[in-house]
């Protein structure tokens, strides 16, 4: 297998995993989403290591690579539509919990005086 083919297969695997990430986001399976994102990050790290050393890929390789990247970017945008509201809720909850903790500490300190 040529290095070019291996690279396209890696992009293809990332594209498949990004689709799985979208499915996980749709079903609010945040643990699976995180695990898949870590898989994608590892694959992307490998691409960054290997790909720069390759010389002059042909037009078909570049076309297919662009197609796969566009699919991943579209999945990423759709995933954000699911994760951003959840992240806002989580941030609000954490902010509320921090505020409650501060109030609790202040109240306990004032009670002791």
Image: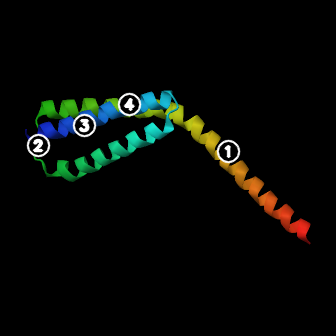
Q: Nearer the viewer, residue 54 or 22?
A: 22
Near mark 2 (Cα within 10 A), the count class, few <14, some 14-19 or many ≥20, is few
Sequence-wise, which precedes: disc 2 or disc 1? 2
Neighbor class of circle 3 (other Cα within 10 Å; few <14, some 14-19, many 20+) is: many
Q: Residue at x 22, y 39 (%)?
A: 10
* Residue located at (48% from left, 40% from top): 31
Label 1 or label 3, whichever comes before in sequence order:
3
105 up-or-down from 42: above or below = below
Identify the mark nearer the N-term, 4 or 2.
2
The residue that disc 2 covers is: 3
Q: Secondary structure at mark 2?
A: helix
Q: Nearer the viewer, mark 3 or mark 4?
A: 4
Q: Are marks 2 and 3 in contact (CB under 8 Å)?
A: no
Q: Which residue is mark 4?
A: 20
Horizontal and vertical percent for residue 70? 32, 31
Which callout, 4 or 2, points to the residue nearer the camera? 4
Q: How many marks?
A: 4
Separation of residues labelled 2 and 1 (CA atoms) = 47 Å
- The answer for how far apart the CA atoms under marks 1 and 4 are is 28 Å
- The picture places residue 19, in percent across and down from the top left corner, at 37, 29
Give the CA distance from mark 4 to mark 2: 26 Å
User: Which secondary structure, mark 3?
Assistant: helix
Mark 2 or mark 3, earlier in chain: 2
Is the C-beta separation of discs 4 and 2 under 8 Å? Answer: no
Viewer-nearest of discs 1 and 4: 4
User: Are dots 2 and 1 in contact, CB under 8 Å?
Assistant: no
Residue under label 1: 92
Tell me: 91 left or right of 111: left
Using the image as rendered, state which of residue 18 and residue 27 is in the foreground.
27
Q: Which residue is mark 3?
A: 11
**Horizontal and vertical percent position of residue 46:** 24, 49
Please name the residue shown 41% across and 33% down the image.
Answer: 21
């Amino acid at each position: 297998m040529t290095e070019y083919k291996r690279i396209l297969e890696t992009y293809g695997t990332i594209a498949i995993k990004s689709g799985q990430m979208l499915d996980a986001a749709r079903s609010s399976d945040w643990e699976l989403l995180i695990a898949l994102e870590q898989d994608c990050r590892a694959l992307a790290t490998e691409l960054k290591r290997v790909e720069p050393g390759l010389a002059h890929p042909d037009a078909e390789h570049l076309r297919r690579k662009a197609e796969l990247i566009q699919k991943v970017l579209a999945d990423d945008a759709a995933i954000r539509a699911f994760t951003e509201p959840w992240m806002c809720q989580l941030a609000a909850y954490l902010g509320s919990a921090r505020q409650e903790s501060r109030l609790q500490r202040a109240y306990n300190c004032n009670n002791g005086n």
